[in-house]
């Protein structure tokens, strides 16, 4: 349902994400100039999109408003504390607690009841905004690579990992009956539309969470290869309830294998753009021709 309130809410939801993706350093400098109380309280404004959408859609509830006002502040406070105690940059239990909270809330759909039908994506994006503000603007976690000013190298790395993963996915997916070929040409416009939507609303959020934050932090504790494989396994498990009412082990397996190649793409230059290109391409090909 497109309404003026929903459009304003969409702009407010996307603004923090895009600002961090294209002007991250400038945003971090501005946030540093704020008094500490304002720096930690600022993400409470993320409740405004909920207020606009829920009031228009008839699903407004005060407890949800309080949750969307307080949870981003709690995230910012925890990550501010993590920054203060983690002088060696090895990652702190508070980092992993925040990842667990945000990841489980999205994966188990804890907050979907707050939103009108078909608008639950707002909840996912607001949690992402809370993570972006906390990890990038407050924690100032290094090595994330959240810069969507794509480079030629990003495209090359992303397509290289796509080429490596595709034959494995086809062999495994077709043999398991997970993939089903639909040899139809959808048209260039439809293909571009599917890829762009997938890139911004699926690939970038998931790559930022799993590679920029999780794999990045785990590397500091475990090393490159253990972090790569553990993150891939967790990425696969996050798909256990996708497109099924039960544990979808085929989806988990294919997603876990894909996660290895997404992680390789990110790790090459530590750039979210590269892994998001691989991720978006895999998902677009699957949704257009193999679902």
Image (cartoon, rainbow, N blue to C red):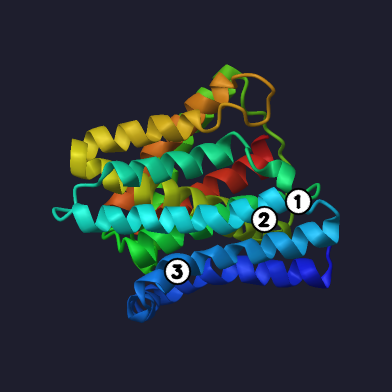
Which numbered disc covers residue 40?
A: none
- The kind of secondary structure element at disc 1 is loop
- The residue that mark 3 highlights is 21
133 or 198, nearer to the observer: 133
Task: Using the image, tell me which numbered label, if any, was put on residue 61.
Answer: 1
Query: Mark 1 or mark 3: which comes first in sequence?
Result: 3
Residue with the most extreme left position: 88
Judging by the rendered image, the residue that carries numbered circle 2 is: 65
SS type, badge 3: helix
Q: Pinpoint residue 38: horizontal percent, then vertical percent.
A: 43, 73
User: Where is residue 161 drawn, in percent x and y?
Assistant: 39, 46
Note whether residue 262 is visible.
no
Contact, mark 1 vs mark 2 (Cβ under 8 Å)? yes
Query: Neighbour class for label 2 at 10 Å: few (<14), some, many (≥20)?
Result: some
Q: Position of residue 257 (x, y in %)?
A: 42, 31
Q: Nearer the viewer, residue 34 or 267?
A: 34
Left or right of 55, for residue 76: left
8 vs 171, nearest the viewer = 8
Determine the CA span between mark 3 and mark 2. 27 Å
Q: Nearer the viewer, mark 3 or mark 2?
A: 2
């Amino acid at each position: 349902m497109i309404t003026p309130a929903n459009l304003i809410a969409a702009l407010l939801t996307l603004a923090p994400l895009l600002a961090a993706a294209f002007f991250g350093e400038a945003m971090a400098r501005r946030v540093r100039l704020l008094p500490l109380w304002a720096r930690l309280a600022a993400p409470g404004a993320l409740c405004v999109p909920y207020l606009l959408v829920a009031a228009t859609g008839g699903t407004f509830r005060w407890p949800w408003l309080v949750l969307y006002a307080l949870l981003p502040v709690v995230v910012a406070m925890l990550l501010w504390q993590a920054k203060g105690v983690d002088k060696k940059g090895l990652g702190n239990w508070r980092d992993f607690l925040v990842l667990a909270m945000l990841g489980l809330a999205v994966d188990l759909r804890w907050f979907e009841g707050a939103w009108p039908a078909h608008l639950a994506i707002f909840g996912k994006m607001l949690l992402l905004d809370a993570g972006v503000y906390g990890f990038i603007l407050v924690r100032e976690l290094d090595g994330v690579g959240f810069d969507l000013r794509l480079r030629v190298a990003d495209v090359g790395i992303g397509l290289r990992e796509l080429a490596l993963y595709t034959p494995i996915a086809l062999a495994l997916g077709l043999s398991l009956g997970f993939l089903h070929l639909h040899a139809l040409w959808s048209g260039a416009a439809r293909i571009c539309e599917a890829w762009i939507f997938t890139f911004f609303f699926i690939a970038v959020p998931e790559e930022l969470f799993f590679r920029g934050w999780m794999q990045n932090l785990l590397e500091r504790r475990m090393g490159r290869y253990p972090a790569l494989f553990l993150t891939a396994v967790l990425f696969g498990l996050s798909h256990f309830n996708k497109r099924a009412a039960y544990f979808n082990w085929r989806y988990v397996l294919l997603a876990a294998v894909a996660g290895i190649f997404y992680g390789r793409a990110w790790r090459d230059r530590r750039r979210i753009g590269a892994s998001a290109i691989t991720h978006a391409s895999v998902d677009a090909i699957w949704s257009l021709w193999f679902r």
